[in-house]
Image (cartoon, helix red, strand yellow):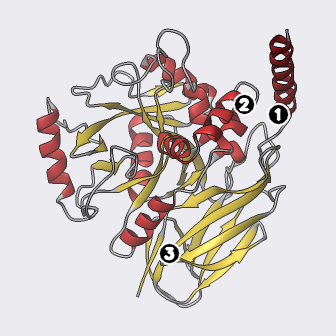
Amino acid sequence: MKTLVALSFLVVTYFLYGFYLNQFDTSIVPRQLTAAHNSDYYDYKGVLNVHTDLTAGSASPSFVVTSAKLANLDFLIFTDLNLFNMPTSFESYHGNLMVMSAGKYSYLDSRLIYYSLVQDSIGNNLGDAQVKLSDLLSQKTGANKDSLTILAHPYKAGYSWNGEIPSGLDGFELWNLKSLSNRAWYESKLSTIWSLLLYPFNPRLSFLRLYTEPTDEIALLDKVSQERKIVVYAGSEASARAIPLANYFIRFPSYKRSFEIMSNHVLLKSELTGSFNGDRAKIFNALKQGNFYLAMDILGDPKGFIATIDDDKQSYLMGSEIKLKKGMRLKVNLPTTPKDFFEIVIYKDGESVARINQPTAVFSIDKPGVYRVQVRVTSMLPLPDAKKWFTWIYTNPFYVTP
C-alpha cells in the first residue's frame, strides 16, 4: 500500500512539474508570424545531413519533405548514407521548399557529404566513391567549382577525423545535432535521461538543457582558417531513429522537431525566383563560399540578422576574402533586442577582440586577419537548472588580407 501511494505521489508530481514546464518559453526574442528579411539581403533557411528510409532514416523522402515544409524551411538537402545512383526525382521545388539530393559516404573512419551541381556521379560503389573523394580532397582549396565536399561531425564518437584537414575539403560541420546529443550522454547520463522525461512537456527545453558549446570544432575552425579558407555548417543528422524500433512504433525525435532546432541561413543579394536550376545554383554557391550563418533557431527566429564588412564603396558578406582598406568596419545587426542578457562577440584570429551588449555593433578593421561573429545569450532555465549561456548565432569567417 505504501509503495502504491509513493508511486502515485511521484506520478502526480511528475505531471504537475510537467505542466509547469509546458508554460516555459525558450524563445529569447518575440515570436513572429512572419519574420522580415534584412533590408539589403534575403535570408533563406535550410538543413543538410538528412536521412530517409532509403538508408538510415525512418521515413520516406516524401514524408521528410512534408516535415520540412511544416518546419518552414526554404531548402532541404538529402544526404542518405552510402547510396549510389541516387533517385533525383525529388530534386525540385515542392511548393516553396527547394529539395536537393546529395549523399553521405564512408571515408576512412569518417563521413563525407558530397554534392555535385552538375550531377557528376560519385561512382557505383563505395570503392569508386572513395577514389573520387580522395581526388577531390587532394585538390587545391576552391579548385573544384561544381562540387561541395563537407566533413560530417568531425568529432563524433567512432567517426572522428584524424590528421590534417585536406586542402580540397570545402568545410565541416561545426554543429551536428547527433554529436551534441551524444556528447551530453557521455558527460551526464542522468541529465540526459531527465531531459528525455521532460521531452513530452517541452521538447525545446529538453534539448536546450543538454546543450554544450562545440569547443573542439571551434578550435578546429580557428586553426584551419589561419591557413586557408574554410566553411562551417550546421548538420541536423535527422533520421528520427533515436530509439529502438522507431520504424514500428514512433519516430523520435520527429523530422519536423529536428529541423526546428538549428539550421543554415543563406544570405543572397537577390531573392529566389521559383526557377529551380537558377535558385539551386544560388544556394549552392552561397554554401560553397560561406555566405551564411548558423543559428540555434529554437532560441528564436534570427531572420533579419546581418554581419558584413563595409568600406566606402561596398559591403562584403561572411565568407568573403577582402583586401584591407582604410576605414573598413565590421557591422553587425540583430533582428531585434533579445529579452535576456546577450552579447555580440567579435573574434580576430580566434581571439575575442570586442564584446558588445547592443543589438547593433560597429567594429573598426585596421589589421588583416580572420574575423568572425558569435551571438551569445543567457537564459534562466527552470529548476533544478539555473542560468546558462547559449550561442544563438555563429557566422562564417571573413578573410581580410594585407
User: Which residue type does callout 3 highlight?
Assistant: Gly
Of the 4 image quadrants, the one containing the C terminus is: bottom left
Residue under label 3: 350
Whether residue 208 sits left or right of residue 98 in the image: it is right
Q: Please report the residue visible at 20 percent of the width from the left and 39 percent of the height from the top.
A: 120
User: Which residue type does callout 2 highlight?
Assistant: Leu
Residue under label 1: 21
Q: Position of residue 10 (x, y in %)?
A: 82, 22
Camera-nearest label, 3 or 1: 1
- Provide the secondary structure element on which disc 2 rests: helix
Q: Which numbered disc flags the more N-terminal residue, 3 or 1?
A: 1
Q: Pointer 1 and pointer 2: residues touching (CB < 8 Å)?
A: yes
Q: Residues within 10 Å of mark 3 (few under 14, many from 20)?
A: some
Q: Which numbered disc flags the more N-terminal residue, 1 or 2?
A: 1
User: Which residue type does callout 1 highlight?
Assistant: Leu
Determine which of the numbered discs, if any, sits on residue 198 in the image: 2
